[in-house]
Image: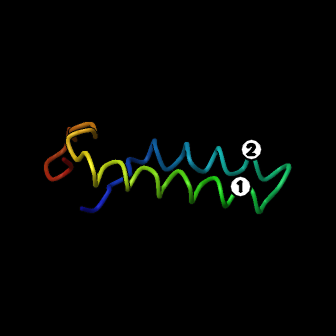
Amino acid sequence: MQVQWTEKAKNRLEEIEVYVAHESPAAAKNIILAIIKKTAAQLSKYPENGKPGRLTGTG
């Protein structure tokens, strides 16, 4: 299964990374990677957990 991130979600991840990077760039990257990995693992285990897409081909 491939997770498709909305623009809003991608922007939010970027905001989180920028915020945390003020204190620690390394921690910021680790947090973002952890969020992405956890999301992918969760959706692989429970694919119906994701919000259905509003556009054709997005869920």
Which residue in the protein does label 1 denote? 28
- Closest to the observer, 30 or 59: 30
Q: Residue 19 carries which label?
A: 2
Q: Do the residues labelled 2 and 1 touch (CB within 8 Å)?
A: yes
- Percent across and percent down for residue 58 are 21, 50
- Closest to the observer, 45 or 57: 45
The answer to whether residue 30 is left or right of residue 46 is right
The answer to whether residue 51 is left or right of residue 40 is left
Q: For mark 2, does the 10 Å Cα neighbourhood hold few (<14), some (14 to 19), or many (20 or more) residues?
A: few
Q: In the structure shown, which secondary structural element does the residue marked by tag 1 occupy?
A: helix
By what rule are the colours in the image chosen? rainbow
Residue in the image at 64% along x and 53% along y: 31
Q: For mark 1, does the 10 Å Cα neighbourhood hold few (<14), some (14 to 19), or many (20 or more) residues?
A: many
- Disc 2 marks a residue whose amino acid type is Tyr
The answer to whether residue 7 is left or right of residue 55 is right
- Percent across and percent down for residue 15 are 64, 44
Marks 2/1: CA–CA distance: 8 Å
Residue in the image at 57% along x and 60% along y: 33
- Disc 1 marks a residue whose amino acid type is Ala
